[in-house]
Amino acid sequence: MPANPFNNFTSYGIGIGLRIPHYRHILEQKPVVDWFEIISENFMVDGGRPLEVLDRILEQYRVVQHGVSMYFGNADRPSREHLKRLKTLVKRTKTPWLSDHLCWGSVDGRYTHDLLPMPYTFASARTTAKNIREVRDYLETPICVENVSSYAEFHASNMTEWEFLSEVVELADCGILLDVNNIYVSSRNHDFNPYDYVNGVPHHRVGQIHIAGHTKFEKYILDTHDHPVLDPVWKLYDHAVRLSGHTATLLEWDAHIPSFHEVHDEALKANQYLGEVEAAEKAGAVAARR
Amino acid sequence: MTGVLFTPLTPGNHMRRRYGARPMRQVVESFIKPNDRLTSFERLELYNRQYWFRVLDSLYDDFPGLRAVLGEAAFMRLAEAYLVKHPSTSFSMRNLGHALEKFVRARPKFAGRRLTLTLDIVRLEWAQIEAFDNEAMSALTSDDFLDTPLDRLRVRLQPHVILLSAAYPVDLLILAAKRADAGLRGEASNAMEEAPEHTPQAAIPLPKREPIFLAVHRHDNTVYFKRLEPEAFAIVCALRDGATVEAACARALRRADPAIDWASKVREWFSNWAQLGWFCRRKA
């Protein structure tokens, strides 16, 4: 299932996040990269170097936008000012799909700049789905919502996180950006089986997958994006792509960022899993033709 | 929950034990589940810490000159009090310092005996942020200035050109502070941070009073400080405020030394400003 409505019927391969320490290397060396993911907020500005760099990247590469402050789970409706800026950027990048998180993060116009977990209730699922639809309709771009890593759970929740995610994406009729590292981190923090999570979401809606590194502490795991991907996350990724098919995959590395080559090489390790899935898909297609 | 998140940490970077009149533990237990390793308090504390690490770190990176003026400890006291009064109201942490000048004016005790210098450096560091990514409109050329009679020509200053007069040479101070501190505001991301570890700046000699007139501007996507003569500064300010070119020059040079050849100076200034692309058309 390389393409679906939620990633705009594209079949992107392995990408990496576009980060400042790599700008020079990318612009000068023009390495072969299937696609870059940008953090939308870093380019929702009126001018200057961020947009100049972005335009030069767009001349050479495919770019997908990923947001960190739309806060679909807010009780308030999405900010019009935010949407206007985002749409300007969408027109610039021509992103085939756009992702942001299944979380909340601001109240009454005051921002936490964090991806806060939600109470998993039907009421919050309906509010979230309404916000996602509003954003998608305004931007006229498919949306994938990403599961966040979390460190706290609410008494008010009356379903699992994956049931909640499934409810939201069905109500909103949108895609999923399945972050398998976040699933792993949350599974350790909240004592659930991460494979139940991956098994439990609607696989036909997965438009993109995130992989990343994390940091273990004595009593919890933090989603620090400052390490290579750890083995349990690769295994979960393997399981996810077997269920969802060959899916656009992105490595996030946001702190202690090593050289471009190190990041890209780490991302390309996903090829071994995608290759097996692709081979299985081809074999299945051949068998079906016979 | 946001009320708890926005509550400042203790000096040891922990969540406070009380929330108003109530024990914090009791407040948090009412909506957050514990698990077998962490109490409700400890779980929410992770988010409380993240909030403060994120916003304080952002201001820390954006105002290295202010840190040099106040010292690290006084800077952190100011930053925390400021963020309590002015929490972020923007999707971008780029805008976090937008009301810092107003806050320092209202609460001068945070500047100690260096209020004027503090205000100067705050305004300059905020101007840098604005100059970095404000809009650039299509710039007027020298020829454009010749097409309209000067008594009718009104121009607009580019949004990325910010004018400020200061009582201290804070442009030099900020360059020294940046040399001592290679910090840049991080990009937005969705990664969690561990407690930031800052290496304190080496002490920087603070400047003596010396009034300066500055344009903080962007050229080829790099931010520069350009010192202006007082008369030049007055002309650009008048143009920014809507005066015609003729009126701006007349106002600025009203009390100028008649022995100086102002006509050629003004020509040179305008030629330079036009080359830097400082002016654009006013909206009709």
Image: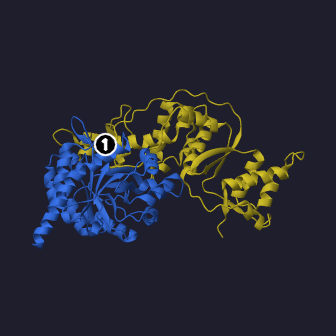
Specify whether B222 is left or right of B15.
right
Q: Chain of mark 1?
A: A
| Number of residues whose C-alpha sits closer than 10 Å to that of mark 1, classed few (under 14), some (14–19) or many (20 or more) | many
Residue B159 visible from this viewpoint: yes
**Between A115 and B274, the one nearer to me in the picture:** B274
Image quarter of the N terminus of chain A: bottom left
Name of the residue lying farthest toward the bottom: A289
Q: Colour of chain B?
A: yellow
Q: Is residue A210 above or below residue A230?
A: below
Residue B20 visible from this viewpoint: no
**Percent from the top left, x then y, of residue A213?**
27, 44
Q: Is residue B117 above or below residue A91?
A: above
**Percent from the top left, x then y, of residue B220?**
59, 51
Q: Colour of chain A?
A: blue
The mark tally for this picture is 1
**Percent from the top left, x then y, of residue B25?**
26, 40
- The residue beneath circle 1 is A224
Image quarter of the C terminus of chain A: bottom left
Task: Identify the image quadrant of residue A232.
Answer: top left
Kind of residue at badge 1: Thr
Task: Identify the image quadrant of residue B207.
Answer: top right
Residue visible at 17% across and 52% down in the picture? A238
**Between B196 and B74, the one nearer to me in the picture:** B196
